């Protein structure tokens, strides 16, 4: 089955009891067992739930993985991955990563004796230099957040495999429509399902997808032992969202490409960071690695200081001032004060998260209206 067919048919079998084409939402927290000490397919809602299971089947099918786990948030999914490690282990992570991931690695994982080194993953040799004897995990995002940097996932996975190091990829921005990291050699794909997979700004969820069944068993054990599972209603919303993922992402890409070209030609914009632009340093790798488009996210540096940038993001009409991304409505934010505020200020500067940087999540409105909104605001505020 092709991607769009899988999105609609895998994990969405009709209800055998009623024939309903949409499986019902199962709310039960516990299940009657065939006998004491004998287990049916489901026993307790933390260990498994049919609605969550359906969403997990779809997730695995879309990422080309063996199995998936749905979590109560993207952060819970990332946390579960860090729990594969022990005290004395070391993580190498890209420099262009979500602020919450930075915070989790530097302010939570470190409490368990796990060391973290950030390295610019746009050149695999930088990761290579950061690897130590005790490195157990490489954490990557491509496109990265918020600078849309592109990492060659195949090259990074190859160098990690040679050294027995696992690679995990946060695929939230690209979605499996555009990039499937497991096919490129990664061990774990992670999602904030809150974003494109859900697609409508109405659920918080996370996911992990893996190819290796032993790794799945370890992650399942961690999830069941620690408890951060996705609830039935959110699992249902996630399943519903994924049915239209490919259609939405394709339109997000078209809109973002037009907006990138508009901004690129605007005199008050210093630089546009969008992998679809030929001038983007990762364009060639992105063209090879991303299938069917360059994503719906882009950042740009405006010709202004912190206050002017703040005023700009506060003044658009259709682009709404909010963190998060990947839904039908367009959002705008200033990473330095919003999505990446949890970075240490020195790291923020070192990693190019400038005060004048603006990040937008391009939605599915008519692109002419979105361009008009940006143009009007640039004229009014700068
Ligand atoms: C790239 C990326 N990864 C992970 C997360 C965390 O996901 P959640 O907010 O669902 O916990 C986010 C949230 O913004 C994100 O943008």
Image (cartoon, grey):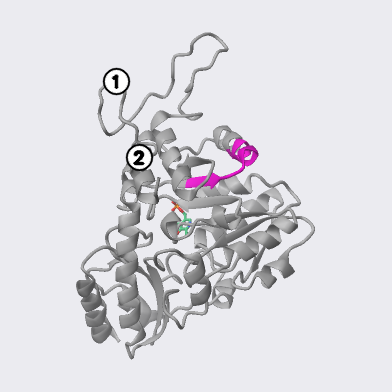
**Residue at point 34%, 60% (across, down):** 249
Query: Element type at marker 2?
Result: helix
Of all residues, the one furthest to the top in this rendering is: 35
Which-is-in-front pick, marks 2 and 1? 2
Q: Nearer the viewer, residue 36 or 209?
A: 209
Q: Mark 2 Cα within 10 Å, few/some/many (few <14, many 20+)?
A: some
Q: Mark 2 points at which residue?
A: 9
Observer able to see residue 116: no
Residue at mark 1: C-beta within 8 A of ligand 1: no
Instruction: Classify residue 304 by image quadrant.
Output: bottom left
> Circle 1 sits in a helix, a strand or a loop, which is it?
loop
Q: In the image, what residue occupies the spot 71% across and 46% down?
A: 86
Magenta stretch, residue numbers: 207-219
70 to the left or right of 242? right
Q: Mark 1 points at which residue?
A: 17
Q: In which quarter of the image is residue 124?
A: bottom right
Residue at position x 35%, y 77% from top? 260
Examine the structure image and report whether residue 217 is included in the region drawn in magenta.
yes
Between 125 and 113, the one lying in front of the other is 125
């Amino acid at each position: 089955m092709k991607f769009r067919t899988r999105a609609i048919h895998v994990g969405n079998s009709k209800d055998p009891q009623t024939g309903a084409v949409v499986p019902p939402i199962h709310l039960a927290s516990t299940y009657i067992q065939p006998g004491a000490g004998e287990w049916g397919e489901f026993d307790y809602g933390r260990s498994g739930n049919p609605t969550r299971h359906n969403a997990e089947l779809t997730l695995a099918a879309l990422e080309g993985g063996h199995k998936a786990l749905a979590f109560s948030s993207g952060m819970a999914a990332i946390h579960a991955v860090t729990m594969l490690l022990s005290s004395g282990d070391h993580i190498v992570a890209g420099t262009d990563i979500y602020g919450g991931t930075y915070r989790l690695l530097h302010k939570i994982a470190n409490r368990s004796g796990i060391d973290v080194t950030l390295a610019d993953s746009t050149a695999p040799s930088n990761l290579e230099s950061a690897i130590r004897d005790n490195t157990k995990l490489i954490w990557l995002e491509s496109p990265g957040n918020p600078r849309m940097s592109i990492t060659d996932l195949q090259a990074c996975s190859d160098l990690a495999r040679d050294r027995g190091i696992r690679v995990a990829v946060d695929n939230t921005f690209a979605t499996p429509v555009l990039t499937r990291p497991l096919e490129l050699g990664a061990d774990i794909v992670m999602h904030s399902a809150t974003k494109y997979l859900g697609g409508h700004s109405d659920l918080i969820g996370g996911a992990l997808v893996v190819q290796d069944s032993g790794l799945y068993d370890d992650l399942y054990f961690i999830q069941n032992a620690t408890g951060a599972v996705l609830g039935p209603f959110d699992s249902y919303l996630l399943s519903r969202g994924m049915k239209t993922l490919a259609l939405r992402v394709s339109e997000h890409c078209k809109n973002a490409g037009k907006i990138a070209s508009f901004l690129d030609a605007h005199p008050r914009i210093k630089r546009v960071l969008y992998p679809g632009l030929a001038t983007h340093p990762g364009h060639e790798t992105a063209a090879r690695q991303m299938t069917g488009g360059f994503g719906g996210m882009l950042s740009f540096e405006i010709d202004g200081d912190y206050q002017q940038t703040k005023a700009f993001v506060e003044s658009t009409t259709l682009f709404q001032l909010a963190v998060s991304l990947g839904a039908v409505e367009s959002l705008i934010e200033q990473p330095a004060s919003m999505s990446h505020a949890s970075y240490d200020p020195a790291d923020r500067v070192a990693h190019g998260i400038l005060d004048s940087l603006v990040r937008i999540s391009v939605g599915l409105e008519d692109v002419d209206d979105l361009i008009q909104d940006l143009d009007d605001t640039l004229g009014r505020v700068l």
